[in-house]
Image (cartoon, rainbow, N blue to C red):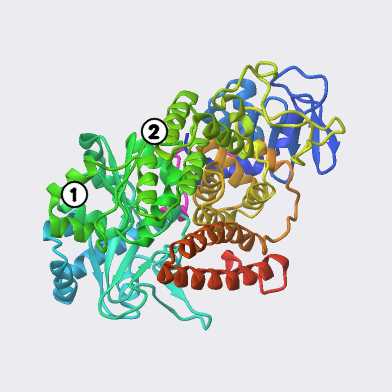
Amino acid sequence: MPVGGSDPFVERVREASDIVAVVGEYVALRKAGARLAGLCPFHREKTASFYVNPSMQAFHCFGCGAGGDVFTFLMQHEKMTFPEAVRHLATRAGVPLPDKRGQGSDSLERIRETLRMARAWFRSQIEGPEGVEARTYLDARGILPATREAYGLGFVPESWDGLLRHARAVASERALIEAGLAVESESGRIYDRFRHRVMIPIETAGASPLGFGGRALGDTEPKYLNSPETPVYHKGAVLYGTGPAREGTRSEGRVVVVEGYFDVIGLAQGGIPGVVGTCGTALTPEQAMQLKRLSDRVVLVFDGDEAGLRAALRALPVLVGPVSDVRVLLPPPGKDPDLWVREDGADAVRAALDRARSPLAFLEDLVTARVLSRREAAGRAADLAALIADPISRDLWVQEAAGRYGVSADAFTQAVRGRLARLPSAAAAPDVIGSGPSSRSRGEPAGRVVDPGGTGADGMGPRGSSRGTDAAVFTDALERECLRTALARPEWASTLATAVGEAGVFASRLGTLLGWIAEAAAESGGRTPGTVLACTIQAHPGATGLTAFGMEIGGDPEEPDALLPRIQLRGLRRRMEELNALIRRSEEDGNRESLDRFLRERQALAAERARLDGLASGRAPAPEDPRKNP
């Protein structure tokens, strides 16, 4: 179902339809603080667990898990389709039905048209006289003209207003700013964002441009400059090269994931099909779901250095669970995938891809290389095992891990059980390996304590269980605050999703939900929190449980000034624990060089921790509100 907020007519109908009045025609509602409560119309109950939040224009039942916006309510109660619900509410509110859908100004289409115009101009520049430097650079990297054309590579000259001057006849300065192509200074001067760069269009699978990556020519910094977040571009939700990779993923039965734009282009040109890139971010849950749709087998091929190793370790918890077959392959030391295929050839890379290691084998390799201790590898393996939903697959994982790391199957099972108990989605608990019959009644969700006084013991909201989604059973206070903040302040959702992904210590489901909220905020223009919540659910029915958090939000939530530092602290503390283990091992081995390196890193992290502690506690200036950025 399309995101309703992207359609101006649907948005007018939503704004004209008060959910309290609509639901009140079917349910007797009474005031319950800032919300209204009543008996749920979707299941039998004697105590009200059905709530409506007027400020969010949403409903949620804490008994059966039903939730959504005014359209969802009619669709579920009256068995209407989405278009039928829209037409019904339009007639009820007196909103005229348009003769032709899509009439009127559409800011999203204006941004897309501006991006298409810029892409065409960048292409014309690289093929023209001024593009000789860019063509020479690409020739030196071995990028053939046919590849240059296939990936739409372009060039922007060294001018502050080249695109601005070209665009005057077809696009306004405001449209260029909204599309991330121009910047407005504090003095009000407007200038091109990209200058003197090879331009790499970031596109949807259908080749519609979303943004650009710009590779500097000469000594300009930064070397790579990417488009900012815009209403149509959320970098954590996009994979670079998806369109050209589709046929290759089908023919090869796998998708290869790299980090850099030229890694994608170089491998594809070198004869390795089905390659996509992560657009300059740590792998996100949204990207993991896209990879799952491309193929059941995902092979990570990051750089052959310490940074690539860490990126692979961060990516595994995001992929294991959603993707059934995850593999890891690191190029030879000192090489990135692009250089690897150019120097060693496609046959060597293809043979290595066929031998790519499973996560358990990869962790065992790190033990052999003395990067991880056997205990650390086993602990990471248990962390990953807890993310596997299917009990049979998880049991096979446990048996293999026990053999690889010299741990008894019983001990490993106990470790996985402990991790499952701590997962935000406690609904997985009954599937713990080796667990006996549950004492719960059939259909009763696990891991949720109900307070007979009217509020769940986890502080989530009105009493009663929450079924239908794991969103309502997050038990970690910081994860719950992230979701509340993203719903109350949708402009922060993308920033929070990126921070959570980079921290690498939170439940993958949290990143998925934050990404969905950010996507809906971009598609809907972020008009109101209620609109974003509704659009999220319309685009992703699995997010229905977010309405439980919507019930907690009032009219004026606090600014999340300390939230980002708290998220970053989680990831930093995890790295500090890893460093302490590495320092102990270096001391035991007498490896002075490694010891000095790890001690320097720990000292730097300690200073960073003090800074973040100050931000989180309000002793230091708060992070900048993302709404103030172009």
**Which residue position is annotated with label 2?**
324
Q: Earlier in the sequence, mark 2 or mark 1?
A: 2
Residue 67 or residue 602, whichever sits in front: 602
Residue 566 or residue 136, whichever sits in front: 566
- Residue 598 pos. (x, y %): 48, 68
Residue 218 or residue 335, whichever sits in front: 335
Q: Secondary structure at mark 1?
A: helix
Is residue 25 at all visible to an observer of this figure? yes
State which region is magenta.
Answer: 93-109
Neighbourhood count class around disc 2 (C-alpha, 10 Å): few under 14, some 14–19, many 20 upward: some
**Which residue position is annotated with label 1?**
349
Magenta stretch containing residue 266, yes or no? Answer: no
Q: Would residue 377 appear left or right of 526 to someone viewing this image?
A: left
Residue ID at (23%, 62%): 153
Q: Are marks 2 and 1 in contact (CB under 8 Å)?
A: no
Q: Is residue 332 above or below residue 452?
A: below
Residue ID at (15%, 70%): 135
